[in-house]
Amino acid sequence: MSDTTMTKQILLTRQSSAYWRATFNHPPLNIFGPETIPQLNEIITALETDEDVKVVVFDSAVHGFFLTHYDFLAKLEDTTSLPPGPTGLQPLPDMLVRLSRAPVASIASIRGRATGVGSELALACDMRFASREKAILSHFEVGAGVVPGGGPMARLPRLGGRRHPGRFG
């Protein structure tokens, strides 16, 4: 896949040297696929190396969709041929781990569906703000009885904490 045929699916706007916005823009559903991986990797690498950036907000330009599942129609070799990232993990989990460790405050601004990769990215961020009217977070893997690949089973319990007797009913 050459860079000349690749469509820009994540628009990075440097609002200031300290505040960046990464906007997903892959209509109609913001499906994440092999073309999105190097684009997100470039942004995460910049977050790790730029000493001036302090905050990054991930949002969407596509109405009703934050970021959805992995592209099931992409050629398998376009994904499996990608080398592991610096953590030694496959590219997607690698980027999510690196985002969760990046020395910036990362925020997911969710106004629509955050399914699969979208939910995994939101869980890897330091903060998540979701619209009451439009936000839906989900994983199709749950209904299919398989383990999601981006680490939500490890992140979600840490965010919710333990249930204490007498709390929540």
Image (cartoon, grey):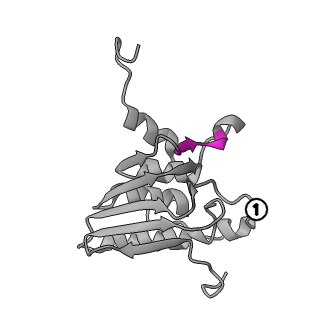
Which quarter of the figure is the C terminus placed in? top left
Whether residue 140 appears in magenta in the rendering, the answer is yes
Farthest residue toward the bottom?
4
Q: Residue at x 64, y 59 (%)?
A: 29
Q: Residue at x 73, y 64 (%)?
A: 76
Q: Is residue 45 left or right of residue 39?
A: left
Mark 1 residue element? loop
Depth check: 131 or 162 in front? Answer: 131
Q: Position of residue 148 (x, y in %)?
A: 60, 45
Q: Is residue 81 left or right of residue 153?
A: right
Q: Is residue 93 left or right of residue 27?
A: left
Amino acid at circle 1: Leu
**Residue with the mark numbered 1:** 73
Span of residues in magenta: 134-141
Which quarter of the figure is the N terminus placed in? bottom right
Please say if 143 is above or below 75: above
Which of the 4 image quadrants contains residue 77?
bottom right
Q: Position of residue 140 (x, y in %)?
A: 66, 42
